[in-house]
Image: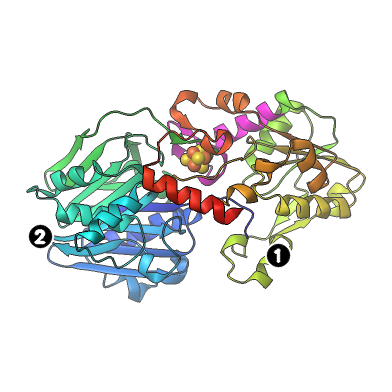
Amino acid sequence: MTDYLKEECGVFGVFGHPEASNLTYLGLYALQHRGQESAGITSFDGKCFHIHRQMGLVADIFKHHILEPLKGEIAIGHVRYSTAGSSNIKNCQPFLMEYALGGLSIAHNGNLINDVPTRKRLVDSGAIFQSNSDTEVIMHLIARSPLPTIEDRVIDALKEIKGAYSLVILAGSKLIAVRDPNGFRPLCLGRLGRAYLVASETCSFDIMEAEFIREIEPGEMLVIDNRGLKSYYPFDAEPKRQCIFEFIYFARPDSFIFGENVYNVRKRLGELLYEYSPCVADIVIPVPDSGIPSAIGFSQKSGIPLELGLIRNHYVGRTFIEPKQSIRHFGVKIKLNANPSILKNKRVVVIDDSIVRGTTSRKIIKMIRNAGAREIHFRISSPPIISPCYYGIDTPTHNELIANSHTIEEINRYVTSDSLAYLSIEALKKAVKNPDDFCYACFTGKYPLKFPKEEIEQLKLFRREEE
Ligand code: SF4
């Protein structure tokens, strides 16, 4: 019962570097915020594939003796938090298989919405699955395609599936990167000397001082081999539906995705929050770390000084990855502490990025009140979350989302703040350059991709279980 939306996954790929696995390790290290359950790397040395996948954090898994055997100049990697498929080693990525054209390894960020009927069809025709991950459905479709080249097979397979996917594929001596036609998840192209790099976010390039070339476009497939890089647009064009929550919370603030720097967008959210929901206060404090850029924006716009009234302990994992109920119970206190010398007798504006269930917010407000704050005005730099995400973000069910069944006034009473305001969708759209290019479904309940019949039945079952 965690109180955060959980990031989905991060992917990374290298083509043409003698230290491909070591670079992938660094790239994954920078993407750790996108998934903390498991990590894996596949490399190809010109003859053989090498792979290591394990539950845990990147730095804990990839010691020198693990990286050393991952030889070759091409490698892909993945960090994962389970969004589809349960949390166990069988679902760790990258996946690696042998098929008619040789070896194939895939790392996937996103979530398919028609994997249930596709998997059923494949199983009915004799396919054997090793995991319950939707990514394995893509691998089966590639393996079963009758087309002669890997590029054609990938296109053939992806034309059968719907949903969110940013894929990095290691196919022998080729590295293929594909982003779904709606572009739900980010995917970026970089260069380090003569090597090409592909990553979910540009912060991966910065860690190795690589050059960011450009984003891979929605619906684009890049094929990188010894002859260079080729770009294809093999799918029917769709409207862009990039995940607005990447800007609000998921992506690292130093990354450049969807045409903008994440920090700048987050800061604008804070400025807009003050414009639309001003209040009189002595200090602005962020809920660290994700609330910091918006709190800076709010403070600069309002002229109310910014203070760090909540201090985060960076040496504990995020609350939601802790495995036991007993630990989770203390999660907020382990992670955050209020600073009474900043808060005592102050009228405080608290800035957070979102409210999911409300339980963590309630604990934070209580902590600030106990530290002596006189008034607490809670400001949220996103609209109320009323619907789950089916495109690669692990969200609680409808009933667990507090804003799905409670008014803002009721939520204010529950979290015990003196006032509560969210950013409106109208204001959120003002924070980005191209507001029509985004998905807002978790705030509106209007999903940009229609679910197939079987998935709708599953969702109905899912909702019945919630009730
Ligand atoms: S539903 Fe929300 S979290 Fe999911 S892709 Fe759309 S904006 Fe992102």
Looking at the rendered structure, the kind of residue marked 1 is Ile
Q: In which quadrant is the N terminus drawn?
A: bottom right
Q: Is residue 393 visible?
A: no
Determine the residue positioned at 57% across, 39% down: 248
Residue in front for this viewpoint, 22 or 252:
252
Question: Which residue does the numbered mark 1 point to in the structure image?
Answer: 334
Looking at the rendered structure, the kind of residue marked 2 is Ala
Q: Among all residues in the image, which is located at the extreme left?
A: 148
Mark 1 or mark 2, which has the lower sequence index? 2
Question: Which residue does the numbered mark 2 point to in the structure image?
Answer: 100
Determine the residue positioned at 21% across, 64% down: 97
Q: Quadrant of residue 91?
A: bottom left
Describe the element under mark 2 as helix, strand or loop: loop
Q: Quadrant of residue 84?
A: bottom left
Magenta segment: 248-273
Residue 134: within the magenta?
no
Left or right, 273 with respect to 109, comes to right
Q: CA distance from mark 1 to mark 2?
A: 51 Å
